[in-house]
Image (spheres, helix red, strand yellow):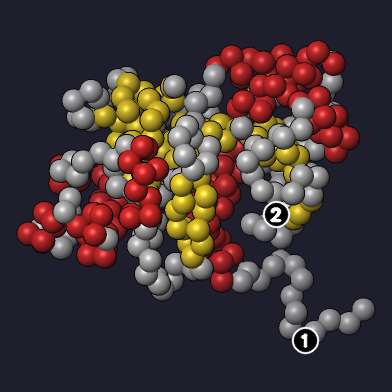
């Protein structure tokens, strides 16, 4: 067999997008241990960069961000951000086209329009970039690191009926060159069919959403079925019912790894590998837990989850109310200094 000169098969020499993912992941190995005040310092500098860009190029944000004109560069603090009104999900659904900044951004990769349809109310569109995709891939690698997952095993993703991925298809994970194949099952089929297909594939890893998983586990208990190779269950979504964890243990004896993920934002927080809490991905999002007076909650208090993605310059969501409630956490004894959420609630 002949190959082209200098053609490297393995380890893979990544292209531009993969280079971004790997470079980001390498930094995440260190930033998860940084002192909280240093994390917040870099968050605020990135946040200020985002706000100044949005205030300059978005008529939607210009009025709310006018205070930046009198603020010296590098002078943004959390109390300044509090001057910006909280944006509701309904407001985003109604005004998403006005929020989008249709301006070419260097070093952000290719832009694409994404259709968001999983919330109540009408679907809406957002513009995201290759950089956002690279960030979400890097955070997947962080989660895999934390759970010490074997990525070479077969994976199954059960996707909601609204997803356009062709059911029954198989593709290779693009994050790592040695990953096992990913098999796609669509939730448009009955849970009985989903379970039978899962049993046929017999993967090592399953990723889906809480509602889909619940129906699948209940069907598995009825049939007494368990994929023998299955090692882990990953659940992406907002609220994860504690009863679902018990159901997974009862049906298959496997714990659930939870990722707090919203389609319009990306990965907000990941389950700690050592404790039943979530660590906020502070390099990617600025999260506020606000009480009924819009004041920050302290550890042990429950409030609204308000998120500002730090990297999406084409659809800047500033102080976006996710519609979720969360309990603010304290210091995690795993040693990671990323802020903690004790739980997400409906």
**Residue for point 84% across, 15% down:** 224
Residue farthest toward the right in the current orientation of the protein: 1
Horizontal side of residue 46 vs 155, given as left or right: left
Horizontal side of residue 232 vs 50, given as left or right: right
Residue 233 marker:
none
Horizontal side of residue 74 vs 94, given as left or right: left
Q: Residues within 10 Å of mark 2 (few under 14, many from 20)?
A: some
**Residue for point 15% across, 46% down:** 80
Mark 1 near mark 2, Cβ–Cβ under 8 Å? no
Task: Give above or below for 346 relative to 233.
Answer: above
**Residue for point 24% across, 59% down:** 59
Among the 4 quarters of the image, the one containing residue 100: bottom left
Q: Which quarter shows the C terminus?
A: top left
| Nearer to the camera, 257 or 86 | 86
Q: CA distance from mark 1 to mark 2?
A: 26 Å
Residue 173 marker:
2
Dot 1: what SS?
loop
Spot occupied by residue 232 in the image (x, y as percentages of width and height)? 70, 32
Among the 4 quarters of the image, the one containing residue 150: top right
Mark 1 or 2, nearer chain start: 1
Work out whether residue 113 can be spotted.
yes
Q: Residues within 10 Å of mark 1 (few under 14, many from 20)?
A: few
Task: Give above or below for 59 relative to 197.
Answer: below
Query: Which residue corresponds to mark 1?
Result: 5
Spot occupied by residue 142 in the image (x, y as percentages of width and height)? 54, 46
Q: Nearer the viewer, mark 1 or mark 2?
A: 2
| Nearer to the camera, 226 or 151 | 226
Among the 4 quarters of the image, the one containing residue 62: bottom left
Q: Which quarter shows the N terminus?
A: bottom right
**Residue for point 59% across, 14% down:** 243
Give the total number of marks visible in the rendering: 2
Dot 2: what SS?
loop
């Amino acid at each position: 067999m002949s190959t082209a000169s200098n053609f490297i098969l393995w380890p893979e020499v990544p292209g531009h997008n993969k280079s971004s993912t790997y470079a980001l992941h390498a930094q995440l190995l260190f930033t998860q241990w940084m002192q909280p005040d240093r994390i917040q310092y870099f968050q605020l500098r990135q946040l200020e960069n985002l706000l100044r860009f949005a205030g300059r190029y978005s008529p939607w944000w210009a009025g709310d961000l006018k205070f930046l004109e009198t603020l010296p560069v590098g002078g943004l603090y959390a109390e300044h951000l509090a001057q910006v009104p909280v944006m509701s999900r309904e407001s985003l659904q109604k005004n998403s086209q006005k929020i989008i900044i249709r301006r070419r951004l260097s070093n952000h990769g290719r832009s694409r329009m994404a259709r968001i349809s999983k919330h109540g109310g009408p679907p809406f569109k957002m513009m995201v970039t290759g950089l956002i995709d690279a960030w979400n891939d890097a955070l997947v690698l962080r989660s895999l690191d934390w759970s010490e997952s074997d990525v070479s095993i077969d994976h199954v993703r059960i996707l909601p009926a609204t997803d356009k991925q062709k059911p029954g298809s198989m593709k290779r994970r693009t994050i790592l060159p040695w990953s096992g194949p990913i098999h796609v099952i669509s939730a448009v089929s009955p849970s009985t069919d989903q379970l039978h297909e899962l049993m046929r594939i017999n993967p090592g890893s399953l990723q889906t959403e809480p509602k889909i998983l619940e129906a699948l586990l209940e069907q598995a208990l009825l049939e007494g079925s368990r994929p023998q190779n299955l090692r882990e269950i990953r659940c992406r979504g907002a609220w994860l019912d504690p009863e679902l964890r018990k159901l997974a243990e009862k049906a298959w004896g496997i714990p659930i790894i939870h990722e707090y993920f919203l389609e319009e934002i990306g990965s907000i927080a990941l389950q700690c590998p050592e404790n039943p809490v979530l660590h906020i991905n502070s390099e990617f999002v600025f999260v506020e837990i606000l009480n009924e007076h819009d004041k920050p909650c302290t550890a042990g208090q429950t409030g609204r989850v308000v998120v500002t993605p730090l990297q999406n310059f084409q659809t800047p969501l500033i102080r976006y109310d996710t519609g979720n409630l969360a309990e603010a956490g304290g210091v995690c004894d795993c040693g990671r200094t990323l802020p903690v959420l004790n739980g997400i609630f409906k």
